[in-house]
Every structure is written in C-alpha cells, then in structure tokens.
Amino acid sequence: MVQNVHAVQDLQTVKELPGGLQVLNELNVLNNLNQAKLLVEIQSVSKSFHKTFKESTMEIKALADVSLSIHENEFVSIIGPSGCGKTTLLKMIDGLIPYDSGRILIDGRQVTAPGPDRAVVFQAFALLPWRTVLANVEFSLELRRLPKEARTKTARDYLKRVGLSDFENHYPHELSGGMQQRAGLARALAVNPAILLMDEPFGAVDAQTRQLLQEELLELWQSQRKTVIFITHSMDEAVYLSDRVVVMTPRPGKVAEILDVPLPRPRVSGEVRRDGKFVDLTNYIWESLKKAMENHHLE
C-alpha cells in the first residue's frame, strides 16, 4: 500500500510540472513498450556477399555483429546510408536469405525460411500487371489455399481500409503510384501477419502522396496493431512513424544508436512536425548520420 501511495504522489508531481500530462503520456507509452513481449530478436548477426571479378573473388561485408530486439506491436524504423545492409537485414528477418553468423528469432523460434507470420511491402509496387487490384490482393490468400468466397471477402475488406474499394476491377497500370502502393499494403495486411516488413515503401511516390501514405499507415497500424519494421532514408519519416529509430553505420552495417521517439500517440502530422522534440530528434539523426559517413570516408 505504501508503494502505491508513493506511485500516486509521483504521478501527481509529474502532472503538476509544465507539460506534465504530456510527459506522463510519453512515459506511459514507453512503459507499455517495455512491458510488451519480445517478438523479434536479432543476435550478433553478420552477412557477407562474394562477388567474382574475372579470376578473383571479393568479399563484401554487408552487416557486422548486428543486435536488436523488437517488441510486439512496436513500430521500429531503420535508417542508414545507402549500402549499409538495411534491406539485407529485412530479407534475413523474412527468411529470404540466410545469415552467416548469429541468430534471428521470431517469438523464440529461429528464422530459417519465410513464414506466415511475416509479410513484406517493397518499394517497387510488385503488383501482377495481368491481375485486377482485387485479384492482386487475393493472390497471397490463394497461396494459403483460402476458399474463393473467403479470400474475396477478405480482399475487399482490406481494399476498403486503404480506400480502394472503387478500384477493385482496375489493373495496376490504371492506378497512380500511391494507389498501387496502397494495393500492395492491402495485399500484405490481408494475410494477417504478426510482423509487417516494409522496405522503403513510399520512396517511389511524390512528397505529397508520401505524407498522405504515412498518415494512412499510422491509422492502419493504430487499428491493426502489427509489429512494423520499416526501412527508410527519410529522417522525418522515421521520427514521425516510429516508437524507436535504429541508426546504422556505413557498410559493413552496424547498429550505431537506438533512439526512443518521445512523441505521444495518436500523432497528427501538422502538430507533430511542429513539435520541438520532433525537430530536435530529426536534426540529431541527420548529424549522427553525417558524422558516421564523414568518419567512414576518413578510414
């Protein structure tokens, strides 16, 4: 009972501070994340590729001793210089390519191949051009042998969620880039994965569409509560979307820093982007990346 009294007094003190309620909200968010179970564990993972040039073979070290833990329902962005192994890491989490050393665990089980608990959204829209939008979303459900009636119902439900109900009979070439990416997102969500892996999904669209897609993704994440691992080159995007931002070094990619995003949810784009903490964290990530790249060039 004494401990509970102290806890109430501590909370009251926080509330009485300038901006105390917002601080309390932020502390609650971080506390909830810390209490959530670990879903993805990356333990000292390294990966190299070997390229043959004429008569010699060159080893290209993509990742070196990467460790990262991600909680259930967490939104984590990974940012770093081009070629630092971000996409390679994502593919290894999905089980598309093997790692050389270390381990990747999902819910305590080692990753050795793709699984139904993961779905990927790529930068390239990757829609089948001969299929309608509805048939594209149904495709992943077909692979899981869902009956026709059930997969059509599910596909239509997710098309509605991404605002494409009126375009289910259109073909990919009849859609804008943003609409194609929405269709790709619907296809990924339709299989109800525990983990959504997103590889620069908004990199190929214009700035206005990109910001709109960011807002729509957060709304979907808020309602679906998936665990999201999001690759991006945009510091603004990483901070706006994420609970934490992982900053990578130049190749071979290592984890340079893992940064908490102290912004309450739900997030309203205009308000968040004017928040001093948003501006400070975005600038900090840029300075961190710039310093890492300068040091890499000096080596």
Image (cartoon, helix red, strand yellow):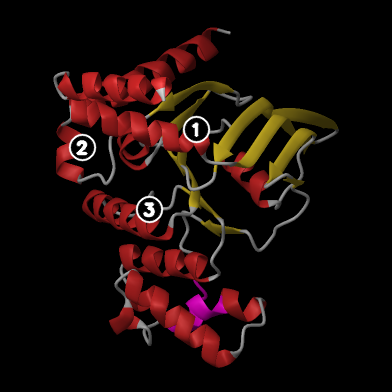
Q: Secondary structure at mark 2?
A: helix
- Depth check: 169 or 296 in front? 169
Q: Residue 195, relative to residue 289: is it above or below?
A: below
Which quadrant is home to the N terminus? top left
Q: Which residue position holds label 1? A: 34
Relative horizontal placement of residue 41, taking residue 270 as reference (left or right): right
Q: Which residue position holds label 3? A: 204
Q: Residue 284 in the image: x percent, y percent? A: 33, 19
Q: Residue furthest right?
A: 55
Residue shown at the point (79%, 35%) measured from the top left: 100
Q: Which residue position holds label 2? A: 272
Relative horizontal placement of residue 4, taking residue 283 as reference (left or right): right
Which quadrant is home to the C terminus? top right
- Depth check: 125 or 270 in front? 270
The reply to whether residue 132 is visible in this rendering is: no
Which range of residues does the magenta coloring cover? Answer: 127-139
